[in-house]
Amino acid sequence: MATIIQLIIHGLAMGLVYSLMSAGFNLVLAAANIIFIAFGQFYMIGAFSVWYLETYAHAPYWAAVIVAAIATGILGAICYPIVFRRLQFTKQQFLTNIIAGVGLMLILGQAALLIFGTTSRGVPSPFSGTYEIGGVRIPQERLVVIILAVAVLLALNFFLQKTRPGRAMRAVSFSSDVASLQGVNADRMFMISMVIGCALAGFSGAIMAPLFGVDVTMGASGLLVMLVVTLGGIGSMPGGILGGILLGLMLSFGQYYVGGGEAQILFFALIFVVLIFRPQGLLGQKGQGGLPGQPGQ
């Protein structure tokens, strides 16, 4: 029983980080209509930022995490006008955004490879102890990751539901033309969604770095995030959260009982089965668009 609880905690820690990343991916997709292929690279950059700041600047872990999130958000703000802005209102917007995202992914990936090489690096955790609850030893660092991920997801929901920029972003996600007629600066909302989405990816990488280390292959996590979004329902924030948790639990139990590769195969099989019976995903709806807070979401 103790092993089962430990696996659940481990799976929730991984899964909620994937949920956090899927929320950022969905935000960019719904508000800016960009399938952000390079999303995983910002996760990697966030992780490397924490490692660099702790190793060379001797920054406290929490300061490094905050700087990593801010830095990746700023990078997103730089990438949007340079890479995506001119593509937003073209006839081939969908295809050109994907091609631009692939190009950005390759550039960031190769830059990281040239700078850091293929060596994997560890990041010291400020939470090295354990809690013992009912005879079950639970690592502090995993509980901290769970708490942080839940707190940020709640903060994101509050932002989208209760703040003026959040409501404007939701309006743009349904129709940028209608939102513009109502006085909303659609381009600014596209930029804000990119900044927040990239910051969420960087923050996710920063809090995961002490658990799994840092290396240049971390960018591949972006592909898993797209699968999580597909499983939960494209454009559905609750669906992305559910999909992330399912992935985390399947990887945790799968790695323990059958191996990591087999666990990923099982997850792919789950997506395949779900899409056969529910092409819109677990919590998605046919024709769904926009961000949470609108009818049908």
Image (spheres, rainbow, N blue to C red):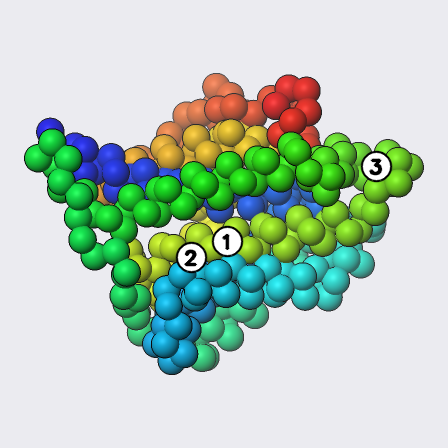
253 left or right of 161? left
Which dot marks residue 205?
2
Residue under label 1: 201
Residue 10, quarter of picture: top left
Residue under label 3: 179
* For the residues bearing labels 1 and 2, Cβ distance under 8 angstroms: yes
Q: Residue at x 29, y 44 (%)?
A: 143
50 left or right of 285? left
- Amino acid identity at mark 2: Gly
Dot 2 falls on a residue whose secondary structure is: helix
Q: Is residue 217 visible?
A: no
Residue 1, quarter of picture: top left
Query: Could you say where residue 42 lies in the image, as x and y percent from the top left?
Result: 51, 60
Query: Could you say where residue 32 lies in the image, as x and y percent from the top left?
Result: 71, 46
- In this view, the residue in front, 280 or 157, is 157
Q: Residues within 10 Å of mark 2 (few under 14, many from 20)?
A: many
Asked if 251 appears above or below 283 in the picture, the reply is: below
